[in-house]
Amino acid sequence: MSAGGRPRVLLVEDDPSLQRFVQLALEEFEIELLTVGSVDAGLAELARAPVALVLTDLMLPERSGFELIDALAAEPALRAGARVAVFSAGLTPATRGRLERPEVWRLLSKPCGLAELDACVRDALAQGPEVADKVVHSSSVATSAEPPPGPEVRQAAAIAEYFGGNAPLYLSFRASCLQQFQADLAEGDKALTDGDAPALRRLAHSLKSVLRSLGHPEAASDALTLEEASQRNDWPALTALWPQLRDALKQLR
């Protein structure tokens, strides 16, 4: 509990757009939402005071979400009964298998809908400190069917799927993303110039979720392709793929 008596929820997420999504999605909850961008900052926050829920990404700078979970397993007092939900765009079957462990309570696949995120927080707060539980897998699955062409139709589909029909919430999130894209463009340019494939991979990993939640599946697919090329360290592909994604981001208004 916070000093004001509100349950504390810790978000470990380095992408500003996704931080903003969670902040907007949970603003009506009577909670203290703590947002940090790294595993070390998250562990420091847990050492300061217990939380009811830890919501963590897996791909983070310096140390991964897996290392955060390992640290909580090594020091149960640090977790203090908090439920741990993994919020990631990389929940492959192999990754899900690695997360079948007692410290992990729920898996949320990015981009997840507003209702699913709300349910995760409500369930964590309602159930109280964890005693023993099985991993609850996200029920949402990616669909191969693309929305019909046309920006209005795609925007409406995104609002329905990811924002529970809440158009003002979508528009607020979209506005924050458009601002963040300027920083993302600079970050991608620098990573390409510096030959920093891991930085490009982290950026693409975040953008694929953000773009899909905004209703831009083609740009999200470009981000996924860039992420995969970054993982392979395929520089001939990267030098072509980043400008392609860059152009797609610049066209969003």
Image (cartoon, rainbow, N blue to C red):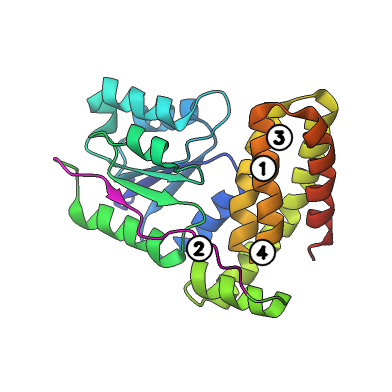
Q: Position of residue 217 (x, y in %)?
A: 65, 61
Q: Nearer the viewer, mark 4 or mark 3?
A: 3
Picture disc at residue 196: none
Residue 219 visible at all: yes
- Dot 1: element: helix
Mark 4 vs 1, N-terminal side:
4
Q: CA distance from mark 1 to mark 2?
A: 20 Å
Please name the residue that numbered disc 4 is placed on.
Answer: 174
Q: Nearer the viewer, mark 4 or mark 1?
A: 1
Q: Amino acid at mark 4?
A: Arg
| Residue 136 sits inside the magenta stretch | yes
Left or right of residue 56: residue 105: left
Q: CA distance from mark 3 to mark 2?
A: 26 Å
In the figure, 125 relative to 115: above or below? above
How many residues crowd mark 1 within 10 Å: few (<14), some (14–19), many (20+)? many
Picture disc at residue 143: 2
Q: Amino acid at mark 2?
A: Thr
Q: Nearer the viewer, mark 3 or mark 2?
A: 2
Please name the residue that numbered disc 1 is placed on.
Answer: 204
Span of residues in magenta? 132-147
Mark 4 vs 3, N-terminal side:
4
Q: CA distance from mark 4 to mark 1?
A: 18 Å
How many residues crowd mark 4 within 10 Å: few (<14), some (14–19), many (20+)? many
Please name the residue that numbered disc 3 is placed on.
Answer: 200
In the figure, 241 relative to 190: above or below? below
